[in-house]
Image: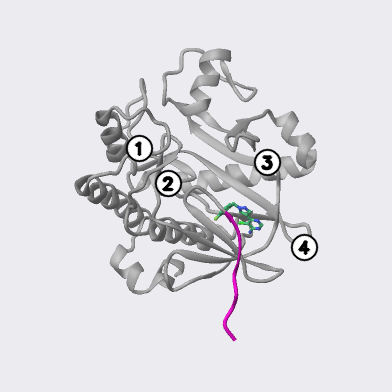
Amino acid sequence: MPETAVHLGSGKVRELYALDEERLLLVASDRISTFDVVLPTEIPDKGRVLTGLSAFWFARTGHIVPNHLLELRDDGRSLVCRRLEMLPVEVVVRGYLSGSGWKDYLATGAVCGHPLPAGLAESARLPAPIVTPATKAASGHDENIDAATASELVGADRWAEAERVALALYAFASAHAEARGIVLADTKFELGLDQEGTLVLGDEALTPDSSRFWPAATYAPGGAQPSYDKQYVRDYCERLGWDKTDPGPEVPADVVAGTRARYVEAFELLTGLAFDDYLADPQAVLR
Ligand code: Q0Z
């Protein structure tokens, strides 16, 4: 009997379906967003790269926290997942000073209530990684909150557990990435509870869409860092002089090819697997 999937929602670049009461299907498209706008041009296999990377990390971090992965489908772009009760707080771990963290630091000398030494440069490595919770605001954008607010939202003990798990995941993944030439500057985890009330890692994890990946070879604090994956697209958009409002521009074939190559390179460096081998047999990433 074929399964019927009920569409539950769309993210900017992903689709979510219900398979039954207990199982969801997460499908990663080849859509790409930049400056918060989804572009009309797709990056071939981008969804497979992100799905393969998520599955790779889920298969290797079960000793830190259980996760929602039940099955990686043979299309290489969809994950069958356990349905969780997601926490209303996103758990961001930052090892470097970038994005909203850098803005917060400039304004207050702290990031989401974590006091930091004076005189840090943009993109500087932090003395130690910090957890900065966020909530999905009504605008759809993430809104940074402090730890006290996160504790109120999920309970102090649960928040302490989420922080501990997120820091352990970041320590594991950032060491793996840095040894392979990729700086994992920061990353966002989405955690949920299973039917027994156990904390479980959900959504996508440690992908370039949920993280900042920087090339280690050119890392230089003192300014913004190029993105490992999206820099060609961003540079093209800047050269065009697009005003960064919807709709975004079509992207030419050479920029698409260069961007696809960067996604594939990140996949191959992090997994140690040839991307063609993933396409031929996605399950290879789980072994
Ligand atoms: C993930 C999202 C997407 C739109 C809900 N295991 C889970 N249990 C319950 N809920 C979720 C998950 Cl992963 C869940 N999202 C984010 C993903 C499209 C929104 F592909 N929303």
Q: Report the Cα–Cα distance between label 1 and label 4.
A: 38 Å
Residue type pointed to by label 3: Val
Q: Give yes or no for contact between labels 2 and 1 (Cβ–Cβ under 8 Å).
A: yes
The residue stretch that appears in magenta: 1-9
Q: Earlier in the sequence, mark 1 or mark 3?
A: 3
How far apart, in angstroms, are the residues tagged by discs 2 and 1? 9 Å
Label disc, if present, on residue 195 of the rendered structure: 4
Front-most of 251 and 178?
251
Mark drawn on residue 11: none
Earlier residue among tags 3 and 2? 3
> What amino acid does circle 1 point to?
Ser
Q: Which residue is mark 2?
A: 208
**Is disc 3 surrounded by few (<14), some (14 to 19) or many (20+) residues within 10 Å?**
many
Q: Disc 1 to disc 3, how far (Cα)?
A: 25 Å
Mark 4 Cα shell of 10 Å, populated few (<14), some (14-19), many (≥20): few
Tell me where residue 167 appears, x and y as whole percent.
Answer: 59, 42
Give residue 87's position: percent from left, percent from top. Answer: 70, 47
